[in-house]
Image (cartoon, rainbow, N blue to C red):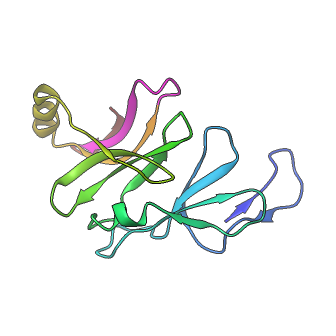
């Protein structure tokens, strides 16, 4: 992965590997996955700063519970990350956990939302937090049409 100044200049290599990069809210770090595809192996996530130090693996113990590489995104507070993926015991799940490690919090849709999702047969492919931290935006496809949810 490389960082290139928006107004021009030399690129800077920040990692020799990684997919799905996500900038931290303050722009000082990048969160990324080691796999582009949803594969049946233990997923890994890394954080790299712009200070030249090597990427560091994060959330390894928690991610060991997933059977697919989850989508990951920073929470607006910059201290937590959220994940959407398939957990070994709990199935498709949405979690928020401190990036430094700690207790994960699972979020579950209301029964009404769950039914709407089932009725539309939507498949979510990506998400991001609203800057306020009060809402989530999901990208999903239903009946061949991709929309925001």
Q: Residue at x 11, y 39 (%)?
A: 118
Quarter where residue 115 is shown: top left
Q: Position of residue 46 (x, y in %)?
A: 54, 63
Q: Residue at x 10, y 29 (%)?
A: 111
Q: Position of residue 146 (x, y in %)?
A: 34, 41
User: Would residue 80 appear left or right of 68 to someone viewing this image?
Assistant: right
In the current view of this chain or complex, which residue is farthest to the front?
102
Above or below, 91 relative to 120:
below
Q: Which residues are magenta?
A: 130-142
User: Would residue 6 appear left or right of 114 to someone viewing this image?
Assistant: right
Q: Position of residue 89 (x, y in %)?
A: 15, 60
Q: If the image is split into quadrants, where does the C terminus sit?
A: top left
Quarter where residue 17 is shown: bottom right
Quarter where residue 44 is shown: bottom left
Above or below, 144 relative to 4:
above
Q: Position of residue 114 (x, y in %)?
A: 14, 34
Q: Residue at x 23, y 59 (%)?
A: 87
In the current view of this chain or complex, which residue is farthest to the right?
9
Q: Residue at x 16, y 43 (%)?
A: 121
The answer to whether residue 141 is magenta is: yes
In this rendered view, identify the residue nearer to me: 104 or 71: 104
The answer to whether residue 57 is magenta is: no
Q: If the image is split into quadrants, where does the N terminus sit?
A: bottom right
User: Would residue 58 appear left or right of 123 to someone viewing this image?
Assistant: right
Above or below, 5 relative to 119:
below
In this rendered view, identify the residue nearer to me: 31 or 19: 31
């Amino acid at each position: 992965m490389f960082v290139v100044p928006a107004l021009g200049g030399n690129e800077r290599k920040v990692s020799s590997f990684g997919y799905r990069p996500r900038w931290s809210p303050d722009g000082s770090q990048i969160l990324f996955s080691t796999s582009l595809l949803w594969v049946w192996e233990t997923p890994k996530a890394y954080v790299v700063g712009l200070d030249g130090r090597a990427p560091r693996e994060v959330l390894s113990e928690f991610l060991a519970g997933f059977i697919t590489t989850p989508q990951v995104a920073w929470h607006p507070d910059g201290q937590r990350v959220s994940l959407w993926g398939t957990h070994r015991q709990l199935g498709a799940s949405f979690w928020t956990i401190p990036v430094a490690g700690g207790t994960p919090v699972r979020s579950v849709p209301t029964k009404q939302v769950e039914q709407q999702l089932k009725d539309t047969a939507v498949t979510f492919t990506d998400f991001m937090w609203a800057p306020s931290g009060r809402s989530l935006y999901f990208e999903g496809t239903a009946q061949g049409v991709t929309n925001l949810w």
